[in-house]
Image: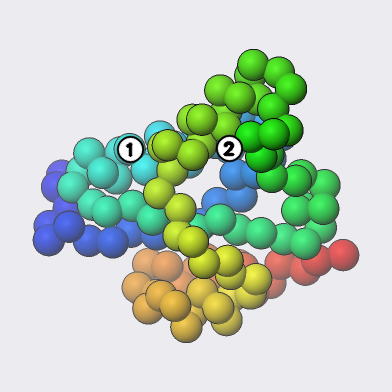
Amino acid sequence: MNINNKQNIATVAFHRAINYGAVLQVYALQKKIEELGGNCIVLDYRNDLLVSKHRETKIGDCKAIKDYIRFIFLSKNKNLKHKAFTSTEGLRTHFIPSISSRNIFKKLCSIKTY
């Protein structure tokens, strides 16, 4: 299956978790979409509660070799949109949702932060 006309496909993910599974999952999905001929844009989902627990790593914070490798991997291999979206309204105004993405907007609207 090939994606025609190099469509832009945005994926919403929280990949700032401490575990590497989220990062690897986003990377694998991005590579598969590109392999199929699409242009993948990764939207970094940020929730105030989650962000306060998991802060972003900067190059100066890399005390262990695994932190440095993760930093290099993330900085080179993710096509992040450089705009932060703090609400689903921001997503709606920036992207025109397709029919298949309506469910994700409904689910995002129902998420409550504590």
- Dot 1 surroundings within 10 Å: few (below 14), some, or many (20 or more)? some
Q: Name the residue under label 2.
A: 22
Q: In this view, does 85 lie to the left or right of 43?
A: right
Q: Is mark 2 on a helix, strand or loop?
A: helix
Residue 58 in view:
yes
Q: Which residue lies furthest to the top in this view?
A: 65
Most foreground residue, 36 or 73 = 73
On the image, the x and y values in percent for residue 53 come to: 82, 47
Q: Distance between the residues labelled 1 and 2?
A: 14 Å
- The residue at the point 41 percent across, 37 percent down is 77
Q: Quadrant for the N terminus, please.
A: top left
Colour pattern: rainbow
Query: Which amino acid type corresponds to the residue marked 1 in the rendered image?
Result: Lys
Res. 113 image quadrant: bottom right
Q: Is residue 100 left or right of residue 55?
A: left
Q: Is mark 1 on a helix, strand or loop?
A: helix
Query: Which amino acid type corresponds to the residue marked 2 in the rendered image?
Result: Ala
For residue 38, above or below residue 63: below
Q: Name the residue under label 1.
A: 31
- Dot 2 surroundings within 10 Å: few (below 14), some, or many (20 or more)? some
- The residue at the point 66 percent across, 39 percent down is 58
For residue 25, above or below residue 84: above
- The residue at the point 57 percent across, 28 percent down is 70
